[in-house]
Amino acid sequence: MTLCMGMPQSLVLERFTGESLHPLLRWMNQPSVWRIEAGRSCLLIEPDPETDFWQQTHYGFRADNGHFLFAEVAGDCIATAEFHCFPSHQFDQAGLMARFYTDCRIKISIEFEPDGPIHPGSVVTNAGFSDWAFQQFPYDHPYDHMQPGDRFSYCLRLRREGRDFLVVHAPAEAGPWTIMRIARLAADQERCCKIGL
């Protein structure tokens, strides 16, 4: 996986080829099991059970215990990451998040559904309420009927411009990139944002 953040130059370019994380990256709710596999250029995460990021809407519960590896960024930025996932449970997912605080954030991911197709989706949380939107993959892919433990790969990009966020996804870093969503977060435009995986 590659995580590249910054604009116009890279603030963080993490290819996970060393023994430790980039010094600007920090954990929120660090997972119990994670490691860098430098030979494969990847960060391997085994998510803890019952972890999520969600606030109130429809389901009525609140959760802010998902795993989040982030850098704090001031101003406009772009975060891009490539994911290789081996999901086994319903709603297993990996993606990107931009977060001002608990009640103001955007999370984008690909979610696993054992009995149906996988969808790229997004959750926007403003004023303590979360929404959820998803779409079909617009390109050919073998993910319509995955079994637990099957591997799938994809790329996500999250671009901040002031309080607005543009979300795109692709089957590979070379593209083609497809727009998923544009959303505005109700935070001060000058506020630093935590952005990452």
Image (tube, rainbow, N blue to C red):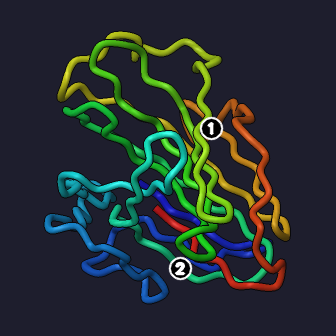
Crowdedness near tag 1: few (<14), some (14–19) or many (≥20) residues, C-alpha within 10 Å: many
Identify whether 68 is placed above or below 107: below
Earlier-in-chain disc, 2 versus 1 = 2
Nearer-the-camera pick, 80 or 46: 46
Q: Which mark is residue 72?
A: none
Q: Residue furthest left?
A: 33
Residue beneath the point at 39% across and 52% down? 61
Q: Secondary structure at mark 1?
A: strand
The front one of 36 and 162 is: 162
Task: Locate residue 23 relative to residue 57 in the image: left or right.
Answer: left
Q: Quadrant of residue 92?
A: top left
Q: Is residue 21 left or right of residue 102?
A: left
In this orientation, which residue lies closer to the viewer: 101 or 121? 101
Residue 119, compared with residue 163, is above or below; it is above
**Residue at 35%, 61% in the rendered image:** 66
Residue drawn at 66 percent across, 74 percent down:
10
Q: Is residue 99 above or below residue 145?
A: below
Q: Position of residue 37 (x, y in %)?
A: 22, 62
| Pointer 2 with pointer 1, Cβ within 8 A | no
Image quadrant in which the N terminus is located? bottom left
Label 1 belongs to which residue?
A: 169
Say few, some or many: other residues with alpha carbon within 10 Å of mark 2 (under 14 / 14 to 19 / 20 or more).
many
Q: Amino acid at mark 1?
A: His
* Image position, residue 93 (x, y; %): 37, 42
Residue at the extreme front: 60
As helix, strand or loop, the secondary structure at mark 2 comes to strand
Amino acid type at image mark 2: Ala
Q: Position of residue 55 (x, y in %)?
A: 50, 57
**For mark 2, what is the residue?**
71
Tell me what residue is drawn at x 71 percent, y 31 percent: 178
